[in-house]
């Protein structure tokens, strides 16, 4: 079975990116994948510093996140746009997960994986600019990123307090992205 790890680049309790990635995850599950949704703020890791790494090794939470990435075939990522780029929460987790600790292959969390990327913002463009740098980052690390992506603009008006979406077109596009990730991974694994 295809295994997908889904997460948002925001730690905010009411994050629209968490809501967006949950819809894509639903699409992936409906397409037959096993999806693990995690909250990055549950992985308590310090800001990456090579001195700290040399003295204390990899923090337990960073190791746990890296192992989750390694044990899944692909990723659903929804990123907030902070000053036209990704959040420090997201980049910090990505940096820790790029560090080799055991006898795993180099960049085992990234190489050979496939990702579908999304962004959500209250602004009209929906974080379109973050998708450019997010795609570049993941591909530089060895993860193939699907050509299709989704920027969700006006996101604050789109969800109720329970994360239900009121925009049928956006819901369809997000679920379809999740499904496309499963279909691509299925072909690659065949
Ligand atoms: C430091 C900071 C920078 C931001 N920069 C942008 C930006 O460049 N473009 C944008 O559309 N929204 C920007 N925003 C607004 C975010 O899109 C908004 O806070 C969004 O809700 C964050 O996603 P979340 O709901 O998943 O936490 C910024 C917010 C913060 C806190």
Image (tube, rainbow, N blue to C red):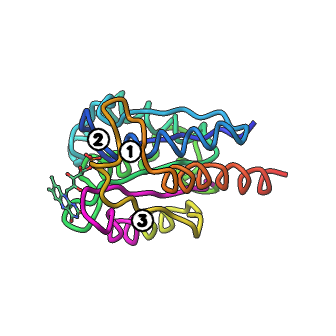
Kind of element beneath mark 2:
loop
* Relative horizontal placement of residue 154, taking residue 117 as reference (left or right): left
Q: Residues within 10 Å of mark 2 (few under 14, many from 20)?
A: some
* Dot placed on the residue nearer the N-terminal end, 1 or 3: 1
Separation of residues labelled 2 and 1 (CA atoms): 8 Å
Residue 163 in which image quadrant: top left
> Relative to the observer, which residue lies in front, 162 or 78?
162
> Relative to the observer, which residue lies in front, 134 or 139?
134
Determine whether 67 is above or below 125 in the image. above
* Quadrant in which ligand 1 is drawn: bottom left
Q: Which residues are magenta?
A: 113-134
Residue 85 in which image quadrant: bottom left
**133 magenta-colored:** yes
Separation of residues labelled 2 and 3 (CA atoms): 22 Å
- In the image, what residue occupies the spot 71% across and 52% down? 185
Kind of element beneath mark 1:
strand
Label 3 C-beta lies within 8 Å of the nearest ligand 1 atom: no
Separation of residues labelled 1 and 3 (CA atoms): 15 Å
> Relative to the observer, which residue lies in front, 108 or 72?
72
Residue 115 placement (x, y as % from top left):
56, 55
Kind of element beneath mark 3:
helix
Quickly name the residue at label 2: 15
Label 2 C-beta lies within 8 Å of the nearest ligand 1 atom: yes
Label 1 C-beta lies within 8 Å of the nearest ligand 1 atom: yes
* Relative horizontal placement of residue 113, taking residue 136 as reference (left or right): right
Quickly name the residue at label 3: 137
């Amino acid at each position: 079975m295809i295994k997908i790890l889904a997460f948002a680049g925001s730690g905010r309790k009411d994050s629209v990116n968490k809501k967006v990635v949950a819809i894509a995850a639903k699409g992936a599950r409906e397409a037959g994948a096993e999806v693990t949704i995690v909250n990055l703020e549950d992985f308590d890791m310090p800001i990456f510093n090579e001195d700290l790494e040399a003295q204390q090794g990899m923090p337990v939470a960073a190791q746990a996140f890296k192992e989750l990435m390694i044990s899944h075939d692909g990723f659903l990522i929804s990123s907030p746009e902070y000053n036209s780029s990704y959040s420090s929460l997201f980049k910090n987790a990505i940096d820790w997960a790029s560090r080799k600790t055991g006898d795993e292959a180099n960049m085992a969390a990234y190489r050979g994986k496939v990702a579908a990327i999304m962004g959500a913002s209250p602004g009209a463009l929906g974080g379109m600019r973050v998708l450019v740098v997010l795609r570049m980052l993941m591909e530089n690390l060895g993860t193939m990123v699907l050509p299709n992506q989704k920027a969700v603009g006006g996101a604050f008006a789109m969800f109720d307090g329970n994360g239900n979406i009121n925009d049928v077109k956006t819901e369809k596009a997000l679920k379809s992205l999740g499904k496309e990730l499963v279909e691509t991974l299925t072909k690659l694994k065949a």
